[in-house]
Image (tube, grey):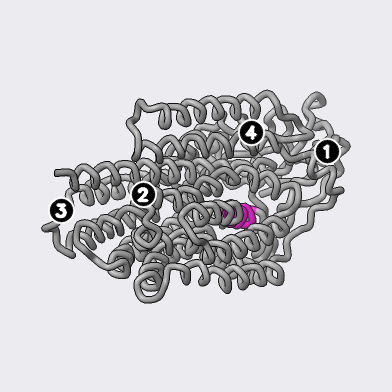
Amino acid sequence: MLFWRCSAGERCRTSASPGFSCNHHPQALNMRKEVDLAHLFVPDRIGGRSDGGSIEVSTPSSLAGRHSEAPTTASGEEAQPEEASCTCSKEAHHFAEQTNYLPPSKLIPIFLALALIDFVALIDQTTLSVALAIIGAEFNAGSQVSFISSAYFISSTACQLLYGRVSDITGRKVLLLAGIWVVFFGSLASSLATDVISLSVFRGVTGLGGGGLMTIAQIIVSDVVSLRQRGKYQGILGAVVALANGIGPVIGGALASTSTWRNIFRLMLPLSFLGGVAVWFFMPLKPVEGDWRQKSRAIDWLGAFLSFAAALLLVLGFTWASEYAWDDTHVLGPLLAGLATSLAFVLWQGYGCSAERPALMPLGIFKSGVVCGACITQTINGWLFVTQVYMIPQFYQLAYGYSATRAGSLLLPLTVVQTAASTLSGLLITWTGRYREILLVGWALWAVGLGLFSTLDSSSGLGKQIGYSLLAGVGVGATLQPSLIAIQGAVPRKEMAAVTATRNFVRNLGGALGLALAGTVLNKSATAALLP
């Protein structure tokens, strides 16, 4: 049932119009249309409402309101947000709104393109995980081999926030195409690298493009699919992510073992080209009007620089700890500088930005407990996930003498179950509107799985390796997508891109720091074991 709610908090079914006062409450302005979904949503469900569960319908005059759910037409398709006669002034960054809920028939080509984009982004990361030892041996890189993977995660993490806000300003399609072509040329350059330094630099360039692909894909889902249906569609994309995580190490191991590791990067050339073609032809996204000078002035370039510098310094500190003591200036210097830069970034986001130049990470979103909780858990999620994807295959190679192909294939049980868990969790959220229980079960199973992984030794059999992977896989799949649905339902529509980018930023930062620290622990342990 549709009704108007005035700012006095009353439901007014009279002939009111948005932006005008209610004839029952003359002082109550900013009328807004809502859909009564109290029978579907309760506290701790999508959005975590405490007002009986009503979800607003976004209109251009109420973009400052909370995230909204679209009503349905008689045919069952979601209605588009209605134009409202509002005399209120537009915000300075009015070009940010790109909501365009589409019927299922129009979503199919979009999601095929998004699935390919997610696949490209993840394959680029995971194919390299089992080939690092081979690359390090060819270049005689020693501990420097960790910079190859760290360079990608540093650059991809640093640009996450920029991608989110810039996509509001330039449009999703333009930025998505730019990211894909950066991946294409970065992969081409990586395939031609002559030493570990040049390869690390080229991987860093690739990360500048690859870092934004999944973020923009998730934002596009929020643009074209309503909140209630979003769990199902995000779950499908989560299954694609899990598939890429599973077959990536196998493909990478096979290419590195049987031919050359350079073919890993050559594989990305046709994949990224196909991704670009799919985006160009299958993404009927709303364009963003405006002069390029105006758009450039609206980008927080200083915030982007500070976030990049902070991520770089923190990861360098953890990485150099493998070669120097923790109290050495090579380690303490970058870590302290990284913390100081992080503080400067937070202060700039809180006090240096304005409506004309909105913050990359608006601090107001952290007033929501859902956002704070999701950011904390996703930092841990990234730390654990990236560490296990990169370190478990290396453990199998070092402890059991497995080939790169076999070590990569032993990640398949984890990722197959992750695929099923991700899809099922998305469907459960769509059916029930709840996500908390799914997250709790997922984290518990993941903790048990990783705890059991830590008990593996040289005498552990294949059954334990696969069984522990299955437990961890359920945990990964059940904790990734529900957090995205929760965090998107907890903020205003205008901050959707920013909060999605923030969630991915902290997750990638956790992954970069976790990978750097895990590499440090591995190098120190291996060195100690080889000493007489």
The residue tagged 4 is: 362
Tell which tag, 4 or 1, sits nearer the viewer.
Answer: 4
Label 3 to label 1: alpha-carbon separation? 62 Å
Q: Are marks 2 and 1 in contact (CB under 8 Å)?
A: no
Question: Where, by quadrant of the figure, is residue 419 drawn?
Answer: bottom left
Q: Earlier in the sequence, mark 4 or mark 1?
A: 1
Question: Where, by quadrant of the figure, is residue 74 drawn?
Answer: bottom right
Label 4 to label 1: alpha-carbon separation? 19 Å
| Residue 258 located left or right of residue 339 | left
Amino acid type at circle 2 is Thr
- Which residue appears at 40% of the width and 38% of the height? 320
* Neighbourhood count class around disc 1 (C-alpha, 10 Å): few under 14, some 14–19, many 20 upward: few
Q: Is residue 172 magenta?
A: no
Q: Is residue 220 magenta?
A: yes
Q: Nearer the viewer, residue 82 or 322?
A: 322
- Which residue appears at 52% of the width and 61% of the height? 193
Tell me the SS state at disc 2: helix
| Residue 289 located left or right of residue 261 | right
Work out whether 336 lies above or below 228: above
Q: Earlier in the sequence, mark 3 or mark 1?
A: 1
Label 4 to label 3: alpha-carbon separation? 46 Å
* Neighbourhood count class around disc 4 (C-alpha, 10 Å): few under 14, some 14–19, many 20 upward: some
Q: Nearer the viewer, residue 234 or 377?
A: 377
Give the residues in magenta. 210-222
The residue tagged 1 is: 90
Residue 313 in picture, x, y percent from top left:
50, 35
The residue tagged 3 is: 457
Tell me the SS state at disc 4: loop
Q: Nearer the viewer, residue 120 or 263?
A: 263
